[in-house]
Amino acid sequence: MDTGYDERTNQQYFTLMAASFKMATSGKFLFRICTAVLSLWASTGVCIAAESRIAEVANLAEDIVLQLHDEEELVGTGFTVYYKGELASRSYGSISEDGSEPLTPITPNALHELAQPFTALAVMQLVARELVDPDLPFSNWFPQFMPWKQNPAWQDFTIRQLMTHHSGLPAYFALGSGMEVHEPDLQAQPWNNLVSRSDEIALVAEPGTVYEYSYLGYSLLGSLIEKVSGLTYQEYIKTNILDPLGMAQTTFVADPSAVSGISPAFINDETVAHRIFRDLPGAGLVSTLDDMGQFMKGLLEADRILDSGSLQQIFSVQNQGLPQDANFEIGLGFFVSPVTGGAFYNTRTASHASTDGVARSYLLLYPKKELGVLLATNTRLSSVKLRDTTDRIMEKMLEQEPEGLPEPWQAHKESSLAETESDRLKGTYSGPGGLFTVEESRKGLKLEVPYLPFLNVALIPREEGYYGVDIRLLGFLNLGRMSQVRQLSESLEGKILDIDGRKLFFWYWRGVAAVTLTELPAPQDFTAINAWKARVGRYSSNLTGGEYTLEFIPESNIFTFGFDGGGFRLFRDPPEIYCAVTVNSLQTCSKGMVGTGSRNVVRAMAGGGIRDAMGVTYNK
């Protein structure tokens, strides 16, 4: 059902469908007249607005979105497109199990992490007013915030590093945070009290060296906004962003279900509760398709809520020259590299995704061309499919441009593998989910994936030192014929780089770094190893209710700290693989999946317990 035209907001929807008609009460009548006589009178130009370019773009987008909606059997789906000053929103399906309540462009949706562009925009407003210097340390405003550092010589993180997820902070602060609230009273640990709990938090990387996604970092930005402006975070956003843009249906809440009329989330046509995020500045957005269209206008049209120079900074690469990031690029509140590649390889798009594990949304902007797309669904869906569909809409918009589509990404051609390169590749690597091993097979090199023991992943040499993959079940059934596995095989390439004396095995999704496997370093401090050997054993956490085991693997001189069962196992629980670093801490070897916040640190505590970077304590 196309609900882009609604009686309750006549002028707004009339503007969407016929943008040049700036009338109020007479708009609906005039639109109908124009539509009726268009075929007879189009050449006169009287009713050209009724068939504006935005209508063409919306129709093209509709074909793509309806295909996704039908093929994936989604309960509700909607999109908003921005095309050179014009907007159109359309929605399909329902927000109820029986289909009786339609999803409309004014239905509130849980857009969670799309809060981050709002927070970064608010900070840049303060920068433009010379109230904040983004390159000064956060501790200038909050000297009491002093998280534990593995190396005391590390510098304090800056405001800019918070906005780009390069602060070295972990993904969350555990008490009452993240996607699951452990404490019954959510307000027992409000996000803006985190600055007083830094003694329980540890940095997981040196600030300014590597990307590490952090909701916690964006909560600290929210505290900065409050301190500098003298307003609450919600008050500041409303006064300086929402009200000027006419976003009356947008709010920031921890529990989206508290918002009247909100679309629930669906799995297999059954409603499920939205997850609760404590960290409002990082994941608390609830908005509508129409309101998000106005947000796109505010970002793509200079001087509405921010000057052009500041907007250019938001969309500019901020992490140049950081080898651990490979070619992954990020702006201020936006990812500015072509995250999914496709037609946008080597173009400067800006994007941000959101999910609560079920409902998903994806915002994609092309500032240079004044184009934007938001696609959202209330039904569990692959993030790759959502992004690919959004990319296809953007492709259709670019086809309207005189120069057409930019050059698409192409995989490197196959090549031979030198014996020296084969030896260099072999080894054990730490990565998301466990240990990865590159070893010799009868047909060449293969990658052993820890959580997929029945898959044989052959490494196929390609030009310029890259490797493709050939995925087979039990070593002989070629899974490349399955569409999703084929897409993975065709889009994934790996390459080994030596950085700071370590081998990093970067994996690129359509040309953009997405996963890093880190070679396990040789042990250097046997005093540290012996100290941690004394702590080997089983642990439990009162916060998560889970059981954990710290083990030592003599063959490689590494430790693992893993979840045994029971309680919660979500983002705040420790990753599986650690390496010995000092007597005081164990540290993860890999940044893992881009965007997951997978780095962690476990510290030795007095009395025999251990504590991770997110503040979770484990006792024997």
Image: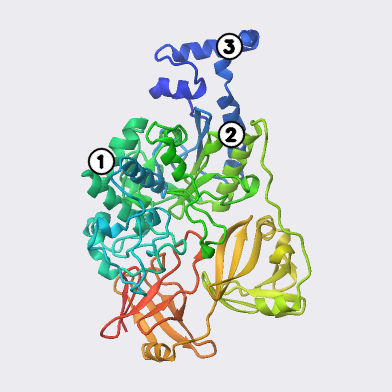
Residue 6: percent from left, percent from top = 44, 24
Give how far apart the Cα atoms at labels 2 and 3 are.
22 Å
Q: Which element type, helix, strand or loop, lies under badge 2?
A: helix
- Say which residue appears at 42% left-offset and 89% top-offset: 529
Residue type marked 2: Glu
Judge left or right: residue 17 versus residue 286.
Answer: right
Q: Which element type, helix, strand or loop, lies under badge 3?
A: helix
In the image, residue 374 sits, relative to residue 318, either above or below, namely: above
Residue occupied by mark 3: 36
If you read the primary sequence from the N terminus, does the residue marked by circle 2 or circle 3 appear first? 3
**Label 1 near label 3: C-beta < 8 Å?**
no
How was the colour assigned to the protein in this rendering? rainbow
- Say which residue appears at 35% left-offset and 82% top-offset: 584
- Residue 294 occupies which quadrant of the picture? top left
Residue 315: percent from left, percent from top = 48, 44
Binning the other alpha carbons within 10 Å of mark 1 as few (below 14), some (14 to 19) or many (20 upward) gives: some
- Between tags 3 and 1, which lies in front? 1
- Say which residue appears at 32% left-offset and 41% top-offset: 251
Q: Which element type, helix, strand or loop, lies under badge 1?
A: helix
Q: Is residue 109 visible?
A: yes
Residue occupied by mark 1: 235
Give how far apart the Cα atoms at labels 3 and 1 are.
46 Å
Residue occupied by mark 2: 62
